[in-house]
Amino acid sequence: MKELQSLLSSGKPLFITIDGFRQAMLTAFPLNGKTPEKPEVKSAFGMTKDEMITYLGSHTWYQLESHLALLDIQKITNQENTTPITLTDEFSDEQLPDNSIAYHRVFGTVMSDSYYYFSSKQLQSDLLAAEANPQISCHFLHINSPGGEAWYLDRLSETLRSCEKPILTFYEQMCCSAGYYIGCHGQRIYAMTQNDYVGCIGTMCSFYDFEEYFAKLGIKKVEAKATKSDLKNKVFDDLRKGQDEQFVKDILDPMNVQFLSEVRSQRSKLADLPDDAPVLRGETFYTPQAMELGLTDGSKTMIEAIVETSTMGREYTEAKNLKTAVYNI
């Protein structure tokens, strides 16, 4: 209302009819001098503007996006499932119901550390918090990613491998490259449809070289190196000149060996394939082929995947309680 009042009294030209202007004036400046107070309406995502601002005070923008997505998923889950299931992104909340599911969203470009994009470091922190919370019994990895930054994925993978609680990976549209590096750690992996694609297991680097364009604009790069700094940035300079042998040998190949070792250790069918198999050389596959190769275990709806995750969590809790009871005898 304040925004409307300011706009109408600003004197700025408005693209509005005379009748529309009259109605706006009566709404903004009622004859009785009182402006009707209306409670702030929640957006379609389930949070008011003030709630979003408060949330951003202690969370990143990406975490806000993930939280809004979770609210939407919870709404669908509550409508379609008769048995109460709790998904949460409040991983340290010990007031959660028993057998709650930790919801981890891996959407868009994978980054090691970011405010606006998915962060590998943040996922690592979230996994550890969920593992320490006795009210959480399992992890739900929700992925839609083409891949991204490789740095820190080895540390994230160590954390994923160390998780005692079961992990289910559910992807929609794509789960590729760095996205699959993360997703392959699910004990079960499901696509949303038959037309989602997965794989792209490989390592590459790409960037744009604007030097010729800048030269046409009269912009020239000036560079000087100390006498004993002749190798400084040499690998990058060679790569820019089309001489990529050293970069591939020293950087890309070792990272690729690491990537292949990780996915093969997590997916038994991939471990049995020869090194020159297309799936291990960067090829991407739709769901039916991915199932044959062992990249994924099938396709399920979101609700089916969540229900199965809940079942995995209950089985984990029951087994843990039984083990504790046996030790206490």
Image: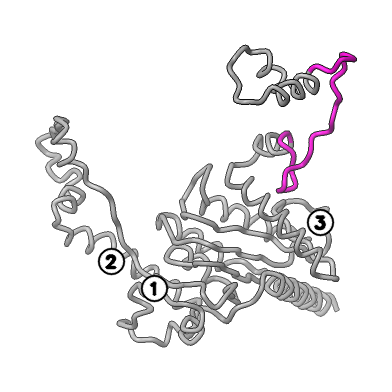
Q: Can the viewer see residue 257?
A: yes
Q: Decide: marks 1, 2 in contact (CB < 8 A)?
A: no
Please state the horizontal and vertical placement of residue 206, each as a whole percent of the image. 29, 55
Q: Which residues are magenta?
A: 29-50
Asked if residue 134 shows in the view, the reply is: no
- Distance from Cα at disc 1 to Cα at disc 3: 38 Å
Who's the residue at 38% across and 79% down the image? 279
> Tag 2 or tag 1, which sits nearer the N-term?
2
* Residue tagged 3: 96
**Viewport quadrant of the N terminus:** top right
Q: Residue at x 51, y 48 (%)?
A: 117
Residue contact at pointers 3 and 2, CB within 8 angstroms: no
Which comes before the other along the chain, label 1 or label 3? 3
Amino acid type assigned to the residue bearing label 3 in the image: Leu
Residue 194 occupies quadrant: bottom right
Look at the magenta stretch and give its main secondary structure: loop
What mark, if any, has residue 260 been given in the picture?
Answer: 1
Quadrant that contains the C terminus: bottom right
Q: Nearer the viewer, residue 187 or 37?
A: 37
Between 108 and 261, the residue placed more toward the observer is: 108
Q: Position of residue 191 (x, y in %)?
A: 57, 74
- Judging by the rendered image, the residue that carries numbered circle 2 is 253
Rendered location of residue 80, percent (x, y): 79, 69
Amino acid identity at mark 2: Asp
Label 3 residue SS: loop
As drawn, the residue found furthest toward the left would be 227
Q: Is residue 204 left or right of residue 166?
A: left
